[in-house]
Image: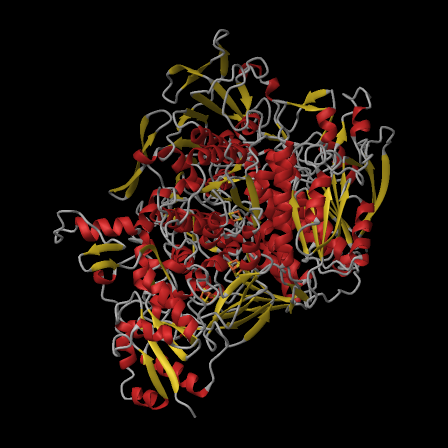
Amino acid sequence: MDKLKFAFYWAASCGGCEIAVLDIDEKILNVVEKADIVFWPVALDTKYKDVEAFQDKYIDVCFFNGAIRTSEHEEMAHLLRAKSKTLVAFGACACFGGIPGLANVSDRDEIFDLVYRELPSVSNPDKTTPQLTYTAPEGELTLPQFFDTVKALHQVCDVDYFLPGCPPTPEMIEQAVTAIFEGTLPSKGSTLAPEKALCEECPLEIQEKKIPFIKRPYQVTPDGKRCLLEQGVICMGINTRAGCGARCIKANMPCRGCMGPTPEVADQGAKLVSAIASILGVEGEERMTEKEIEALIAQIKDPLGTFYRYTLPISLLRRKVIKK
Amino acid sequence: MVGSIMVVGGGIAGMQASLDLADSGFRVYLVDKAPTIGGVMAQLDKTFPTLDCSMCIMAPKLVATGRHHNIHLLTNAVITNVEGTPGNFTVTVTMKPRYVNAEKCTGCGLCAQYCPVEAVNEYDERLTLRRGIYVDYPQAVPLVYAIDREKCIGCGLCENICQAEAIEYHQTPEEEQVNVGAIILAAGFDEFEPDTKKEYGYGRFKNVVTATEFERILSASGPFAGHVVRPSDGEVPGRIAFLQCVGSRDENSNKYCSAVCCMYATKEAIIAKEHNPDLEATIFFMDMRTYGKGFEQFYKRAQSEYGLRYTRSRVPCIEADPETQNLLLTYETEDGTITKEEFDMVVLSVGLEPPKSNQELSSIFGVPLNEYGFLDWKIFEPLKAKDGIYACGAFSGPKDIPDTVAQASGAAAMASGVVSGERGTLVEEKVYPEELDVAEQPPRIGVFVCWCGINIGGIVNVPEVMEYASTLPNVVFVDQNLYTCSQDTQEKIKQAVEEHSLNRVVVASCTPRTHEPLFQSTIREAGLNPYLFEMTNIRDQCSWVHMHTPEEATEKAKDLVRMAVAKSNLLEPLKSSSVEVTQSGLVIGGGIAGMTAALGLAQQGFTVHLVEKEDHLGGLLRDIRYTVSGEDPQEYLTGLEQSLRDHPNVTIHTQAVVEKVEGYVGNFTTTLSSGEEINHGICVIAVGGQEHKPTSYLYGEDKRVITQLEFEDMLSKGVKAKTVVMINCVESRDDTKEYCSRVCCSEAVKNALQLREQNPDATIYILYRDMRTYAFREQYYDKAREAGVVFMRYDPETKPRLEKKDKSLVLYAHDSALDLDFELHPDLVVLSTGVSPYDNSALSQMLKVPLDRDGFFLEAHMKLRPVDFATDGVFMAGLAHSPKFIDETISQAFGTVARACTIVSKERIETEPIIAEVDEELCCGCQVCIPMCPYNARELDEEEKIVKVNEVLCKGCGSCVAACPSKAAQQRHFRDSQLSSMIEAFVRR
Amino acid sequence: MYEPKIIGFLCNWCSYAAADLAGTSRIQYPSNMRAIRVMCSSRVDPEHVLRAFVNGADGVLIAGCHPGDCHYISGNYKTERKYVLLREMLEQFGIDPRRLRLEWCSSAEGGKFAQVVTEMTEELKTLGPIELGAGD
Ligand code: SF4
Ligand code: SF4
Ligand code: FES
């Protein structure tokens, strides 16, 4: 059998997903035994030109990590889509926008202002910000466009599979790769993770799902036995896909949602608002005044950032309103 | 024997009795002299002590009564003759003409808009006007207009305008003979008419109103749309006085206490205060009788939170300032000072009187009335008027809504007890054709747009809406109807379903709250599942509220139709499933409540297990030696116990307690301490209560200090003491026990009278805070005063003090009424300590039913479900619920029987079709949904680690569905996809 | 003139009844709202509200029974907590929280219902059409 051709690409991401590939340890050897890597900017010196020269569908499987932050990312998404038989959104950022997606609470101008002008460590007397073109003595230089809005991969091109996680765990990667080699991938569009939420895998014990008060993770040391929500720590495991093995929970930290929402959920944040507010203060709800309710709810700091930590770009509203 | 029962009076009592009977297999004839049912409760704004909106809590019962296929409403009707014997009466009912054909009238109200005649609106307590053709109130059942022929000028306008052709001027009275096995009298009450009390100037002074008038003024649907203004000039009153006991506790009118006025005045004052926080409200009263469950706490809150002023004084007369129409009250405070005070408005807390028709009812039915004109009943038979004829509610004396509702259920149990063998013989079940299987078919939607005469069509361009509907996806048929609800249209709809193979039907007309069942039944007759139906409201919420903007109304109607069609695409057939019922009951507690309930259930033909922790039955009643009206409780108890022991359906388990309860309504399994397992379909909690044992007043230290029950025992053996002092409210209405125990005042009076009889020379003092001898118990308070019992009122701040000097007892008391100190030397001090609950926590957990703050069991709804729990299939009676008298306990116990019969009378119980479900592929077992459910319908399946819905318990609110973070939980008929489809169709694309 | 579009989620037992009563009492109010009937206000999911906004609603009304009056005992308490949290989050999204309104209307309060819709319509007129997202 011919060896398969793999490609890896990195858009707006932290690089963790690249490391994750290496984290499958010695099994990487099985991979290279069965597949050639034809494009991998961090590891191989292949140029965009080379990719452009590939025939359409030349690549068998392209693993694309990172969100779409700039026009470069978007162009590469289109290019790799055209050149690949199978395009996999790899990791939370490609799947949902991920942590970079939280930048959707601001827009380009705000970000540039802050990063290039306002931060105390910036020395920029001319107050210049990145320009699309710049005429240097050597000729014209260009930079990609920095978008107002971060997007997930499937919002700019067609995606065949989603492999979520921040980053995807070695087990998940290995399973996905095995499925590719064995030709046992599920139907197109699938997410390569379980359908149920993390509670399914969670080792903690649920006594009564009620939240008496909210504590931020640094304010408590959970007892390691009881459901974190019941101990007042916001855990997003209730509608975040399982498949990670509850790693954070086992490290006594709450789930922050990197596996993305369960399949029926259109807006993870809204559903979490619904669930968390419903069980927050159920005890004694009939005696609470409006003020008390507000105080109770105010314990949740930054609901948007908390409940959409990884999924703001794919939420119903997608981003904060840009006032004209 | 006939399996049908007549209920006379369609107020809350009559409705409750009818529903209980109809739901347990009997045909019911509900007769009301008014054109609509609902009674007084329909006029109330809010109800005490929870301040629930009266119409909100009553409307579902109204609708259920009107819609029940086993309840036949005979409104505008009077009873003219009764013949026969228990089990088989023939009642002649005369229906007064309403001059409107009830079959044809759609209740649209167009006629009333055109009627040129005005008449006073009785529903609004004569504060507004209505038309000559009218319904009492918009939610009325049946929603059929009536012509007031006294006012009608016969102009013919209504006849011309009514496109349903419902006006029939020529109608004449009709007589109907109805055959029934038993009769329940629930004729309610009239309100005392204060015209006779000239000193209050009612009728002369515009700003003196009755409490019911004020209730209407408070109501959002009342004469001033909920703005609290005074009648004379429409100004907002800043100072309102409430005068208590108008027409109650009064030599010159009614001697009895009306039992509800203290609470309703407090309630009205609170609501008025909520409307206008600056209001100064003063309640002039003699004794504050807030004796019911949660009432004392309400009274306290009225003072502390709302700042109501309570002034202990009976105001003798009112004068009005002719200029300002303000009212001048001159009254004597307790210390004897005469005070004059000005108010902007005065509310007379008028009492409850027997309806004038009681005399007639009494002679037609041959039932006795007491000296006041209410039914004459016996302590141990509070619901019985005579054999085969029972009574409930205010017909047998003034009482509040929860007591009325408990009695209504109780009367239903007694009445159906007469004909229990005939259960199910006269109920009608509708037979439908077999249901078509449309699951695999693509949607074929038919849309029917209603003109509602000109109610819709006069504003909304119906043909245009219809035309538009035909362009919507999957709509294959559209039609318009003059009246979609008329009989011939039902045929048209059925035909259309057949001819065009429709598998979804949308009706755009009036409100689904009243009309959905009709159309559902129509499409069911055409072979479609009733849930393949969607309705949208283009009348009440469109044409009627946008009368001046017809184009906008038409656009809105189109949008609404589009949304309904969008949802109908996704509708699915729904079926209710059913579970088998173990047709037997378990009664926990063998006191009078439990014994009564057990016997009642047994007499209805069901097996019953009665569980009692002691080795004997009888509970607290064993300590009651006599009643104030002279009956012998022990004799009654012996008889009751004998009937129980003789009854083949009853198994008694003494020295047994409940250890474990599993299951749910219809299917409980209970394990007793003996190890025995009992399967039962329902459970009655009748665990009783106990006399509170005090720690104050040297109790336990000195043998001369005893409790009322101990005193009663002593009296039964003879008491020689010369000076006896009774102290009421000991460790009650204070920090030990916040609540009032309701019975102690009367208990003290009873014991005082008994002592007086035994010992005419004894000096008897009763030290009290408020004498709460409510309703007819007032007569014994009167009697005790006449018999020379000394009543001395004390304030909680200056409580009596008891000391032991040398060997004798000295009691220092401050009479707050006279503001004098007394030193008494009693031989015996009797403490009224009230009733305490047992420790009910274990039972409460086992049965998953809540306790209130005082430790008594907490009912599903304070007002309308006094013997039910939110958890289906569990009921309560007696002291387990709250302190109460024997007759009240018996009424409640019978109440549980009727409520239980609505379950155990069925072989299977059907689940609601619109309930929650769980997608097992998606449920992760997070259990967020479990605490959402007020009915304990959600439970974790320990094995599969997912949550399952108990379909019998689920009421279909959808709380759990919205809370489920994964959308594993869904609500049938209101699925996420269905609601989303409506949202997505909201804007025209 | 700009006419705001409002979606109203009305609970079957009180607020839908209040809307009906406004009709039977012929109380006139602006025609900007389209109702979606739910059995209890607690069925309304914040996701529905966001979906309404992205589908063109300028405002969303959730109406239920008064506290203590919920036909299902405690549904509206949950509604209230969800509403408060959602309102806060909407603000973070840059959506004026006045676009989402929670009201209690008893079945006797036809007038109040009409007033709520009127007020809300007026308020939304001053706020102007909803703007979402934008930018590139
Ligand atoms: S909330 Fe949803 S996922 Fe969680 S246990 Fe309930 S049904 Fe299952
Ligand atoms: S829909 Fe309501 S009643 Fe049914 S299970 Fe859910 S919370 Fe309970
Ligand atoms: S039924 Fe109206 S809010 Fe729950």
Visual colour scheme: secondary structure
**Looking at the image, which residue is at 27% across and 41% down?**
B803
Q: Is residue B600 visible?
A: no
| Residue closest to the eye, B691 or A6 | A6
Q: Is residue B428 left or right of residue B516?
A: right
Image coordinates for residue B163, horizontal then vertical, percent: 80, 34
Q: Is residue B472 left or right of residue B956?
A: right
Locate the N terminus of chain B by quadrant.
Answer: bottom right
Image coordinates for residue C130, horizontal then vertical, percent: 44, 42
| Residue closest to the eye, B262 or A173 | A173
Q: Is residue B307 left or right of residue B960?
A: left
Q: Quadrant of residue A77?
A: bottom left
| Residue closest to the eye, B170 or B888 | B170
Q: Is residue B892 visible?
A: yes
- For residue A276, above or below residue B460: below
Image coordinates for residue B677, horizontal then vertical, percent: 55, 75
Identify the residue at the far top of this view: B323
Q: Quadrant of residue A146?
A: bottom left
Image coordinates for residue B852, horizontal then vertical, percent: 43, 52
